[in-house]
Image: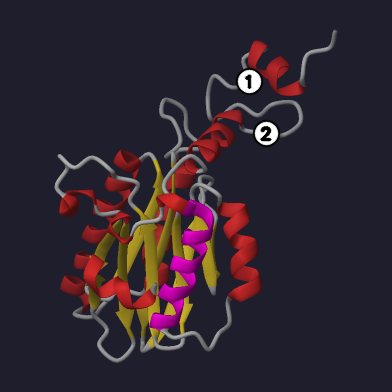
Amino acid sequence: MDMPTEIQHQAMGYDRTATMFSPDGHLLQVEYAEKTVRLGSTIIGIKCSDGVVIISDKRVNDNLIIAGSANKVHEIDEHIIAGAAGILSDARILIDKARVIAQQNRVTYDSPIEVETIIREIANTKQMFTQYGGARPFGVAIIVAGIDQGEPCVFSSDITGNYFSYKAIVIGENDEKIKEMLRLKYNEKLNIDGGIKLALEIFKGILGKNFELKRFDIACVKKSKGKVERLDENSLKKFT
C-alpha cells in the first residue's frame, strides 16, 4: 500500500530541518509551525473608521492565574498594539524586539515609528529562521495595528515572513470559519464600538455556552487620541 506523500517525506528526512525542501517544493518544518498557529488562541484585528481594535480570546480559565498576567494583546508603542497566536514564548521575543525598535526610532528621529516598519522587522526576523540552519521557525503569527499619521492600519505576518495589510484579519483557532464571517459582516463604516460588537458576536457563535466576557483581552487605538486603550470586563457588557 502506498504511503501518503507527507509520511513519505518524513520517512526520507525532508522534515528534519527548516531549510530542506521536499521534492514537491514544501518546507515541512514551516508547515508544521503553521499548524501550531491554528491551535493557538483566536485573535481578531479590525480596521475601523475611527481607529483600530484587537480582540483576543485569552482561553485562561484557571482561577489561580492573575488575569492581568495573561494578556494576549500587547502595547508596542503608545500608538501601536499587537496580538499573537501560536507559541507565546516565541511571540514574546518578537514583541520585545518590536518595542526596542520603536523606542530606538523615537530616540533617533524624535518621532513615532510607522506601523508597517514594525511588522516588516518582525516579518524579516521570522523569514531568517526559515532560511538558515540550526534553529526552528518561530511558531507564531502576529497581528500589528495602530495609527500612522492619523490613519488606522492593520497588518498580519505569517510563519514564513510574509505580511499584508488588512481591513479585518483573524489568526489562531477557527481562523477560516471566522474569516468567512468577517467577509460577510465587515464594512468599512464600522467604528471601534461596532468592531468590538461584531467580534464578540462572532466569538459568541463560535464558543457557544463557553462564551464569557472575562475571557477576552481587548485593546484599541483611536484616531482622535492616538493612544492605546484597554477595555475591561465591565466596559464590555454594553456590547452583549
| Three-letter amino acid code of the residue under disc 2 | His
From the viewer's side, name the closer residue of 52 and 136: 52
Query: Is residue 201 highlighted in magenta?
Result: yes
Q: Judging from the image, what secondary structure is the residue with disc 2 in?
A: loop
Residue numbers of the magenta segment: 192-208
- In which quadrant is the N terminus drawn? top right
Determine if residue 232 is in view.
no
Q: Main secondary structure of the magenta part?
A: helix
Is residue 164 placed above or below 84 in the rendered structure?
below
The spot of residue 172 in percent (x, y) is 48, 49
The spot of residue 135 in percent (x, y) is 41, 29
The reply, left or right, for residue 128 in relation to residue 147 is right
Residue furthest out toward the front: 209
From the viewer's side, name the closer residue of 185 and 23: 185
| Quarter holding residue 164 | bottom right
**Residue drawn at x 45%, y 77% as measured from the top left:** 195
**Residue drawn at x 26%, y 77% as measured from the top left:** 112
- In which quadrant is the C terminus drawn? bottom left
The spot of residue 237 in percent (x, y) is 30, 72
Residue behind mark 2: 26
Query: Is residue 154 highlighted in magenta?
Result: no
Q: Judging from the image, what secondary structure is the residue with disc 1 in?
A: loop
Determine if residue 6 is in view.
yes
Residue behind mark 1: 14
Is residue 101 placed above or below 91 in the rendered structure?
below
From the viewer's side, name the closer residue of 41 and 234: 234
